[in-house]
Image (cartoon, rainbow, N blue to C red):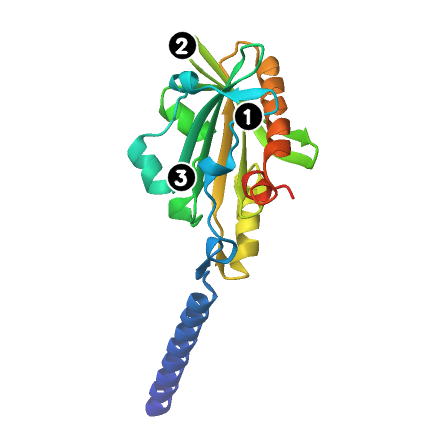
Amino acid sequence: MREYLQRSFQVKAVLVLLLATLAFTLTEFAKPNQKLIDKVGRINIAAALPAKVGSWQLDTAGSGQIVNPQQEAALAAIYNQVVSRTYVDPEGNRLMMVVAYGEDQRDAMALHYPEVCYPSQGFEILTNQTSVVATSRGQVPVRQLVARQGRRNEPVTYWVVIGDQATRSGIDKKIVEFRYAKQRTIPDGLLFRLSTIDADPQHAFALQADFAHALVDALDAAALPRLTGLN
């Protein structure tokens, strides 16, 4: 009897080991193993962004106002490309644009969101809400927040594109990543941030929406889905 129980225990142990090995093998096999950019090609963010966006013109003298709420070393570790520009309209309004792009959106390399990065650099987040920006090609889901540091009041509009789809929350991002994971594909990711120094958030958000609308019309067909999630 004892010998039978011992043999039965050994058989069960072997089965458990085999099942564990099989589960591990299937898990490894199911892991994403190909980057999306290897399928669709890389994008040069700086080259894709025009110097003229509607009535907005590139202002090379205004880039000093841009605040990068992350240190350069952190930016280099996470992103493959970071483009910072300032645009000015005929009324003299200045808009700061930062585009951060990463080829690999697995957790360790995931995009860092402004509502997390700004406070780390001493800003207070006064408001944080979801919205949409209407364009000629459809609506872009965005998040709008107001960051303040001393007398600097900085309303921010941003959106995130994972692969070819715009998202505005961590849950949305995970859903898109899961869709790519089922194809064993590692998506790229882009955070597109617009901000202005303005005591009136609604005025600032209206300017940012105007810029985003004009940007959609100014981008070429290849860059449009990669930078906005629109087709």
- Which of the two discs, 3 and 1, labels the residue nearer the N terminus? 1
**x%, y% of residue 192?**
51, 33
Q: Image point 40% across, 78% down: which residue?
A: 18
Front-most of residues 227 and 49: 49
208 sits left or right of 66 in the view = right
Q: Which residue is mark 1?
A: 52
Classed neighbour count for the residue bearing mark 3: other residues with Cα under 10 Å, few (<14), some (14–19), many (≥20): some
- Count of marks placed on residues: 3
**x%, y% of residue 14?**
37, 81
- Say what secondary structure mark 3 lies in: strand
Front-most of residues 180 and 18: 180
Mark seen at residue 81? 3
Residue depth check, mark 3 versus mark 1: number of the one nearer the observer: 1
Q: Are marks 1 and 2 in contact (CB under 8 Å)?
A: no
Q: Are marks 3 and 1 in contact (CB under 8 Å)?
A: no
- Which of the two discs, 1 and 2, labels the residue nearer the N terminus? 1
* Alpha-carbon span between mark 2 and mark 3: 30 Å
* Alpha-carbon span between mark 1 and mark 2: 32 Å
19 sits left or right of 169 in the view = left
Q: The C terminus is located in which quarter?
A: top right
Residue depth check, mark 1 versus mark 2: number of the one nearer the observer: 1
Type of amino acid at the residue the image marks with label 1: Lys
Type of amino acid at the residue the image marks with label 3: Gln
217 sits left or right of 83 in the view = right
Front-most of residues 219 and 181: 219
Classed neighbour count for the residue bearing mark 2: other residues with Cα under 10 Å, few (<14), some (14–19), many (≥20): few
Can I make out residue 130 in this image? no
Q: Which residue is mark 2?
A: 150
Type of amino acid at the residue the image marks with label 2: Gly
Residue depth check, mark 2 versus mark 3: number of the one nearer the observer: 3
